[in-house]
Amino acid sequence: MATQQRQIVVSDGIDCHAKHADKNIVKMMRRALTKNNLADQIELVRAGCLSLCEFEPVVIVYPEGIVYSHVTASDVEAIVKEHLVAGTPVERLIAPENELRSERIPAIDNIPFFKDQVRIALRNCGMIDPENIDEYIAVQGYKALAKVLTTMTPDQVIDEMKKSGLRGRGGGGFPTGNKWEFAAKQDNTVKYMICNGDEGDPGAFMDRSVLESDPHSVLEAMTIGGYAIGSHQGFIYVRAEYPVAVERLQLAIEQARTYGLLGDNILGTGFAFDIDIRLGAGAFVCGEETALINSIEGKRGMPNPKPPFPAVSGLWGKPTVINNVETLASIPPIFLRGADWFSSIGTERSKGTKVFALGGNINHTGLVEVPMGTTLRQVIFDIGGGIPKGKKFKAVQTGGPSGGCITEEFLDTPIEYDTLIKLGSMMGSGGMIIMDEDTCMVDVARFYLDFTKDESCGKCSPCRIGTVRLLEILEKITMGKGTMDDLDALRNLGEQIKVASLCGLGQTAPNPVLSTLNYFYDEYVAHVVEKRCPAGVCKSLVHYEIDAQACKGCGVCAKNCPVEAITGEIKSAHLIDDDLCIRCGTCADVCNFDAVATH
Amino acid sequence: MGQVELRTEKETCCGGLERRERVLKAIERHRHVRGALIPVLHDIQDMFGYLPEEALTLVSEQMQIAMAEIYGVATFYSFFSLEPKGEHVIRVCLGTACYVKGSQAVLDKLSEQLAIPVGKTTPDGKFTLEAMRCLGACGLAPVLAIEDHVHGKLLPDDATKILDLYR
């Protein structure tokens, strides 16, 4: 075989599947390479998600590291002919929007989106073929496991974990080393190691990305954990909504068994450990440890009171450690490069890096991994590229349904577990939804409560009944029927639900309401007193009006109005009958002159 | 009721010998798995698109689990359905990223186009319209999924075009 001089990486996450990147681009690329007699000289890798969602499908050409974004079928031919054959990068195909470019033809490491990132958990995502264990091994995969099994005692492994300062990335932020230590101390021959891949926060997708793009790193870390606590059986609990992740995990487990990296005698050391997959079935509460355990046992996913903690009595009453996907993916590098290296990244109380899923009204949606202590402003504006269409930043929501909204004045806060809690939000699993001036904060609170009300398991009444009551009040306000007493009621009720609920779901469910009440009180008051939605989102409070100056009298709005609420002569200003109007917004959408205003 | 009859005719569950065999096989496959109820329910839903009562009765007998408990589990998880679904299940993501980018309007438009409320199936059994919580494709918000196929960056007017693909 000829020496391969170049490598082409095609990203292949679910987002890319949606755009047909998957087999089509890979297939076309392979065909084009063969046609040009390059198939032997260039390695084609179908890699996982590079998390540059906004720009995918992405094709990267190494060794230069040149990134082609939004690659279409016709582009493939051009890339092969002009870049690979003739040797000139196809400038017109490199991020045409100019958003990824800091220089004329940037290499991947110089792209603003990647420049400020430190990728530990995502180190292999988009870089290797997730369906090929050899590619993982080639990037030092399973080397940490070999080191642990052959040179360290379980106690030393736990000490190293404690020294690294790694805290749980799923939301709780509990130190991973301590968790392992509790379970290790239990005198029991049967213990379990569980990977929590029940990524429930709507807006977070880093776990999916890791499981789809680098499944072996999770298997390796679970095996290390199993050795440390004395467990021989692991379970990965993953959402049924992630079929690609499930498929690749299954494949990865089979490959690891074949290679002797899972099974009865791992790497010939005599240590036995195996992993099974369990599918979730769509219940947010199953992200809570004890609820997840009940679900694996085949029961309804309802939480139990703690103590006893799972590390003492968990799955089938045995000591159990539950670690989140991102936490696990961070572990192999800790053993390869040392706890001191890891703890040198980040801040005093939050070590290492954290992955955030940037979404909502932001230019670069995707996953970013930054050192703890990076400010919100850096993440949103430097890496995320700011707010699209020149709109104004209004708030960033972190922590999903358990978190809160943070305003402009706090954007320079370094991101840490504790600072976010102080701001009335939380790290959560790392969802970061950016909201611009067109977002109504009362509606956002209502949205989250609608979610937690649905997802409350019903076991304890503060959560079961309280979330419904909170939602009812919020709906009343968005309908323009709220009173000032309702605002007090929201606050009182919210505080009580927080202290009285059984598990994390209820204890944090009021956060979206309380934090928006705190930072956007004026907006609530506008809904209640003036019966006005400043952002123009709450339909009952929105009124459409045609600006007589801007209206050209073309009649398009009247023609499209489904309820014939618009009248007017051609070439003269039209008028909307507010009583007939159903506030569908069609007139504003179809107007070519921006003459329809909402207020 | 149209779609129920249509389904029953097409997918007779455990009265049909072959289908009964398949359910039994699914149970057998998990015979030695602890906490096998949920994996078995997943398999059955994969086969029929929902959990037919006759199949659950069979599970109850074979696995020695009370019907009440099975019903409790089946109704707790939003992924399981006790009602037959349409030929195509349209799931519109109402995760935060999609919601902020206007997925509610897409869902409303689909509901209007199909003339069914969210959660229901068209009388011809062709489409079921559902709202779902985060597909994890936030980079493409707003998105919807039909079977395993994701459509992203939607505007309400795309609803008609997408429906046409499946009509």
Image (cartoon, coloured by chain):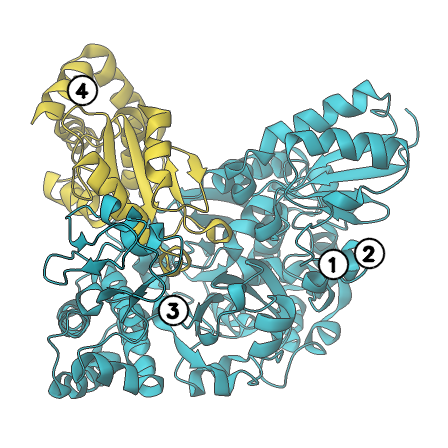
Chain colours: A cyan, B yellow
Report the Cα–Cα distance between label 4 and label 3.
50 Å
Chain to which the residue tagged by mark 1 belongs? A
- Amino acid carrying label 3: it is Asp
Q: Secondary structure at mark 1?
A: loop
Q: Quadrant of residue B53?
A: top left
Q: Which circle, 4 or 3, is nearer the viewer? A: 3
- CA separation in Å, label 4 and label 2: 63 Å
Q: CA distance from mark 2 to mark 3?
A: 34 Å
Question: Which numbered mark, 4 or 1, is in the foreground of this view?
Answer: 1
**Which subunit holds the residue at mark 2?**
A
Give the mark nearest the N terminus, 2 or 3: 2
Label 2 close to label 1 by CB (< 8 Å): yes
Q: Which mark is residue A104?
A: 2
Q: Is residue A395 left or right of residue A81?
A: left
Q: Identify the residue position indicated by label 1 in the image.
A: A101
**Which residue occupies the foreground of this view, A95 or A461?**
A95
Q: Quadrant of residue A421?
A: bottom left
Measuring from the top left, give residue B101's x and y in whole percent: 40, 57
Report which quarter residue A500 is drawn in: bottom left
Asked if A143 appears above or below A479 in the picture, the reply is above
Do marks 4 and 2 share a subunit? no
Cα separation between marks 2 and 1: 7 Å
Identify residue type, mark 4.
Answer: Cys
Give left or right: position of A6 versus A591. Answer: right
Foreground of the two, A146 or A331: A331
